[in-house]
Image: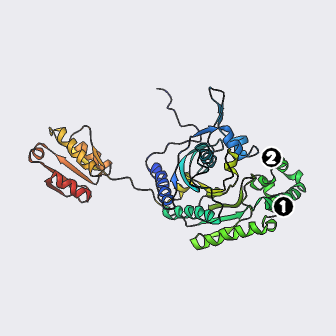
């Protein structure tokens, strides 16, 4: 016998309870974002590598270490998407939507791919939901997209221990001032920085604030924050977002260490974090990216959004969604299968999940019904078929009665 094949490291099968948790997250997000006026888009799982090299920056760990990139048979460099904001912005541009009906509110759900060490709630193929508001420069857009994320957490019943941590990246002038202050601080500690952070110091010092190296983290702890370097306009923008969130009932906490390193990010940066997942505490993160659509070849298009890991959200669910309980149709002995199939068709037409065993005597078919956790069984023998009735057995109460097939369908659909 050949050795059974296993899923590739960092991937997994979603079956049974795990799939139901996964599905529950997506469906809750669909319902909530629809209430906010979002439409769902689906972009390709792989893109031209330049889509992500432009959007993530050539000094990021994702681009330098984690992307699944390959050359296709035509010689083009292709990358499995490590995130989907860039793909949504590319889709806005390539479909000619940058000049019409803005802002666009976009929701998405699907798999992403990163080559990194698998850990709790994180896989090499993982899944995200996300929401983007494309073409809106106002503070209300930031507040609405964040509130939509919070309402998804509310709908899932997982807000206990979750808080929104929020920061501002300011406008271009604010970031220039802040970048200069960071360069001065990190240059004074250059020799103690990791090699990666020494490279970032030359190219993009804000990325040092994201470093996971323990030595870097100690230096980051004493680094200046952006707030003293904000222009009056940037400070006013941040205050406006916070006021809106207060009205919308989203609990917030300022965290000056939340940053985004690329120049097209501006103003709001945020993360929903929890103390229930250990060190991997971020369940949703996003911010404003006013220059990303322009990076994709489009016009300046102010935008804001977030992404959330479905696996982590699913882990926080208090209980697994129950599997639907079907009705079992059980033909006995020589009862015509045509009669049983007609009954199955009527039940499913009424919206009732229905199972029919393909073989076996009455005992075995009843055993299968119990294994499926069926709520009822409809038993048809020759006499029932001749009389146009069925035996309706309530598998919870253990009761059984004979009634017309149409009445059984009506009762089970009530």
Which residue: 66% across, 65% down? 165
**Which residue is nearer to you in this view: 39 or 19?**
39
The C terminus sits in image quarter: bottom left
* Mark sitting earlier along the chain (1/2): 1
Task: Say if residue 376 shows up in the picture.
Answer: yes
Q: Quadrant of residue 233?
A: bottom right
Question: Which numbered dot is residue 384?
Answer: none
Q: Where 385 sits versus 206, above or below? A: above
Residue, disc 1: 177
Task: Say if residue 362 shows up in the picture.
Answer: no
Q: Where 313 sits versus 328, above or below? A: below
Classify 10 Å Cα crowding around label 2: few (below 14), some (14-19), many (20 and above).
some
- Element assignment for label 2: helix
- Element assignment for label 1: helix
Q: Position of residue 21 (x, y in %)?
A: 47, 53
Find out whether the residues at labels 1 and 2 contact each other: C-beta distance under 8 Å.
Answer: no
Q: Position of residue 361 (x, y in %)?
A: 21, 40
Residue, disc 2: 196
Which residue: 58% across, 66% down? 161
């Amino acid at each position: 016998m050949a050795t059974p094949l296993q899923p590739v490291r960092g991937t997994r099968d979603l079956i049974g309870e795990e799939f139901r948790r996964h599905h529950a997250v997506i469906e809750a997000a669909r319902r909530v974002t629809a209430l906010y006026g979002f439409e769902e888009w689906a972009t390709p799982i792989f893109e031209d590598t330049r889509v992500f090299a432009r959007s993530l920056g050539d000094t990021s760990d994702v681009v330098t270490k984690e992307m699944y990139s390959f050359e296709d048979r035509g010689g083009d460099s292709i990358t499995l998407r490590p995130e989907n904001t860039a793909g949504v912005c590319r889709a806005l541009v390539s479909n000619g939507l940058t000049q019409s009906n803005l802002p666009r509110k976009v929701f998405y759900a699907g798999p992403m791919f990163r080559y990194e060490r698998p850990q709790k709630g994180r896989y090499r193929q993982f899944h995200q939901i996300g929401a983007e508001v494309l073409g809106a420069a106002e503070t209300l857009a930031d507040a609405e997209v964040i509130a939509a994320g919070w309402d998804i957490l509310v709908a899932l019943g997982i807000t206990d221990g979750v808080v929104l941590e929020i920061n501002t990246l300011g406008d271009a002038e604010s970031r220039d001032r802040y970048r200069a202050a960071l360069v001065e601080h990190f240059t004074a500690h250059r020799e103690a920085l990791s090699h990666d952070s020494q490279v970032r110091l030359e190219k993009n010092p804000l990325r040092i604030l994201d470093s996971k190296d323990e030595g870097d983290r100690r230096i980051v702890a004493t680094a200046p924050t952006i707030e003293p370097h904000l222009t009056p306009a940037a400070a006013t923008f941040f205050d406006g977002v916070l006021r809106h969130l207060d009205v919308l009932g989203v609990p917030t906490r300022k965290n000056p260490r939340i940053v985004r390193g690329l120049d097209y990010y501006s103003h709001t940066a945020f993360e929903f974090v929890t103390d229930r997942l250990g060190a991997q505490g971020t369940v949703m993160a996003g911010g404003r990216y006013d220059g990303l659509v322009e990076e994709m070849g489009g016009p300046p298009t102010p935008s804001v959004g977030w992404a959330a890991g479905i696996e982590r959200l699913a882990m926080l669910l208090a209980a697994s969604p129950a599997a639907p309980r079907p009705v079992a149709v059980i033909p006995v002995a020589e009862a015509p299968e045509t009669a049983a199939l007609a009954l199955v068709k009527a039940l499913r037409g009424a919206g009732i999940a229905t199972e029919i065993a393909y073989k076996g005597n009455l005992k075995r078919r009843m055993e299968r019904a119990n294994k499926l956790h069926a709520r009822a069984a409809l038993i048809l023998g020759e006499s029932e078929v001749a009389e146009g009735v069925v035996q309706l057995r309530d598998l919870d109460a253990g009761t059984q009665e004979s009634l017309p097939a149409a009445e059984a369908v009506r009762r089970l659909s009530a």
